[in-house]
Amino acid sequence: MGKLTSWFKRKPTNSLSHSGQGGTNDSLPPAYLAQTRQLLSKMKIFPSKMKSNQATGRKPLYRRIWFWAGLSVGGGIVALLYGVSLIDRTLPDQAQLNAVLREQTLTIKAADDTILQQQGEATREQLKLEQIPDNLKKAFIASEDRRFRQHNGVDPQGIVRAGLNNLRSQGVVEGGSTITQQLTRILFLKQEQTIWRKLKEVRLAQKMEQELTKDQILERYLNLVYLGSGAYGVADAAWVYFSKSPDQLSLAEMATIAGLAPAPSLYAPDKNPVAAKRRRDLVLQRMQEDGVITPEQRQAALQEPLTLKSSLPKRMQVESPYFTSYIQKELPKYVSADVLKSGGLVVETTLNPTWQKVADEAVAKTLRNQGRWENFKQAAMVAIDPRNGEIKAMVGGKDFGKNQFNRVTQAQRQPGSTFKGFVYATAIASGKSPYDSYEDAPFVVDGYEPKNYSENFHGSMNMRDALTRSVNIIAVKVLIDVGFTPTIKLAHDMGIKSELKPTYSLALGSNEVNLLELTSAYGSFATLGLHTEPHGISRIINRQGKVIWSANFKSKRALDADSAAIMTWMLRNVVEAGTGGAAQLDNRPVAGKTGTSDDARDLWFIGYIPQMVTGVWLGNDDNRPTDGSSGSAAYTWHEFMEKAAEGMPVEKFPKRPKLEGRKGTIKAQSIKPKQMLNRSISSDDDSEGENSRNSNSEDSGSSKRRRSRRSYSQEEQQSGDSTPRRRRRDRSEESSSSNSSSESSTPRRRTRRVESDSPPPRRTRPESSPANSSGSSGSSSPQPSWRDRLRPPH
């Protein structure tokens, strides 16, 4: 600017014409110079009264030092404010400053707040500040931020002191970052060493100091700081290095842990004990200098040897792995992908750890004992509170470490006779009485011929007794009366989600379902027809401790209350006088249903008390036949429920409603078969069936002896309609039978014999003998076979 002004002030030394004839090169026409001066004056660059200033001897504004100094300072302030605003736009908002967890972490908790699983850089044990020993807190302050209580997030004095100490030591012995700065870096920033990251760290620390108290900042820091060897927070570090809780640490051990914060890999006592001891001694020195400990305390701590007792981080432990894997798969239903990706979530679940332990033990015991004798290798169990749909226990298989396949939620298996519950419920809801009778006799419908497992027939039988004895032929006849559509709709309303096909074999459980949906559906009987969606998550909490989702599943009416009460009354009889006898509990009523698929490939029992419904499945993953019966599943159910129900109030089921004058709530849609053939019971069949009822056993003589040689238990002897062991031959739903009828004109018929539901002899109850309850004359049970006498005790 000075040169420009001087140029305008210069006078031409040699005036010549404008035609360019001689003169200086920089001379310009006077008119041009005048116009230029006027323009610059308007732009406030060149004063209009230059001659006046020259006359008075004043310097123009642009030539004064204070003008440029002020301009520089003002520009710096503007630049600083702009830079701060630019940084602020990249920082988390004020609400996020309350974060208590790192990003990319996931913590799954049980109903009692115990941790089931953690993923990412998670802290296993979050401590309140008052739970942390005072000396441990002061050790970290002395080591990391001696003016923690005085600064507002950034400590210039500490930065200068750290720089001088590092220069004197010719190495990095002290950091300039405050505890607040370190916490912001842990929660929000990456670890790259850049000026931009440092500026954001400083600004975040200032904002955090405005949002949180010093105690809140210190508590978060002590719970989140990484201290090496997979330990996050002081509680984890105390366990990892010394196998202690923080309140059990000595002063020397506290100083050792506090000394890890600047460089865990460098000062880790299990990797570099010499450096760790040197660092510990420095922390103790600073604690004495700050007046936290006395010289005597310091000296005693210095003389203490560095003794380690290492343990794996608790966050590596996973409890109830089948359940926690199920929870992780459920999470996307309730929170968005972005929320899951950012992490820092705490998932509170419905799992009862005590019941889960009992379930694990019951399943393990069954696999160890019955599984070995009855040739099944896998088992699954799930327990649900039917009143709210909360899953309380889940065992998805034998060994999660070897096979993560969850047989509760992922395995689709034929439910066998457990599906009869929906068929009979539809009939009751349509207005039928449980005392309505059907003929149990040879029967063929559209080429499909259902068979009873015993291959015997009982003549006229009411629905209650048919359900108790799990008679296949009558179940199919009931299905024909009520129709496919109403039955399938009711099953879906009650909780079955799998596809159900309208086939006659539907009544016998030919359509595959999973254990979770089947158990949940039976829970609708326990709640007088109300169904609540089964779920394992109660709440999801974000990094700031805010609840972002909570369970609010509403019950829906699936079945009218009277029909549900009648079904419970019928299903109680299955346990008290039928195939589910092994599930009886001494002090409370039980209702439920057994089920067995072809060749005993699937063994089921779904049972309930008013407060809980539990389902059990036994079988093999490769669908191989077993040598067991559904009585083993009922026995497993009993083993779990007997302990799980301890301390639970005894509640009774509602009384059976009056049957007279009932009106249906479901409209039956009877099936009209193209061809239906009913045969009367032959004399041989009749005498065999009568013998079955009189002797409490379906076979006699050599047939019974042959079965005894093949049987591993006496399960066939305890049911009023006891059934022999399934013959090992293919009995698929659609298999043909060449000798199903003596009439040559009868087409080849499809047969299905799926039920082998009999209670095992392991829990004989004379007071509830099936024979006595069914009205037949009882006889003494036969002696156990040699295999039963060799069976190991349970």
Image (cartoon, rainbow, N blue to C red):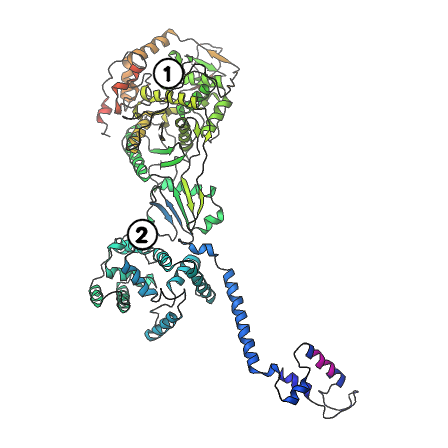
The amino acid marked with disc number 2 is Pro
Q: How far across and down, in percent of the image, does residue 637 sit?
A: 32, 29
Taking 234 as reference, is 764 above or below it?
above
The magenta-colored residue range is 34-40
Q: Quadrant of residue 183?
A: bottom left
Quarter of the image where the C terminus is located? top left
Q: Marks 1/2: CA distance?
A: 57 Å
Q: Is residue 502 left or right of residue 722?
A: right
Q: Nearer the viewer, residue 604 or 713?
A: 604
The amino acid marked with disc number 1 is Asp
Q: How far across and down, in percent of the image, does residue 679 sit?
A: 44, 9
Q: Quadrant of residue 686?
A: top left
Q: Is residue 36 magenta?
A: yes
Q: How far across and down, in percent of the image, does residue 298 sit?
A: 22, 66
State if disc 2 and disc 1 touch (CB < 8 Å): no
Q: Tag 2: Cα neighbours inside 10 Å, few (<14), some, or many (≥20)?
A: many
Taking 355 as reference, is 610 above or below it?
above
Report the residue marked by disc 1: 465
Q: Is residue 69 left or right of residue 220?
A: right
Quarter of the image where the N terminus is located? bottom right
Q: Tag 1: Cα neighbours inside 10 Å, few (<14), some, or many (≥20)?
A: many
Query: Magenta span: helix, strand or loop, mainly?
Result: helix
Taking 318 as reference, is 64 above or below it?
below
Residue 423 seen in this snapshot? yes
User: Element at badge 1?
Assistant: helix
Report the residue marked by disc 2: 313
Q: Is residue 618 magenta?
A: no
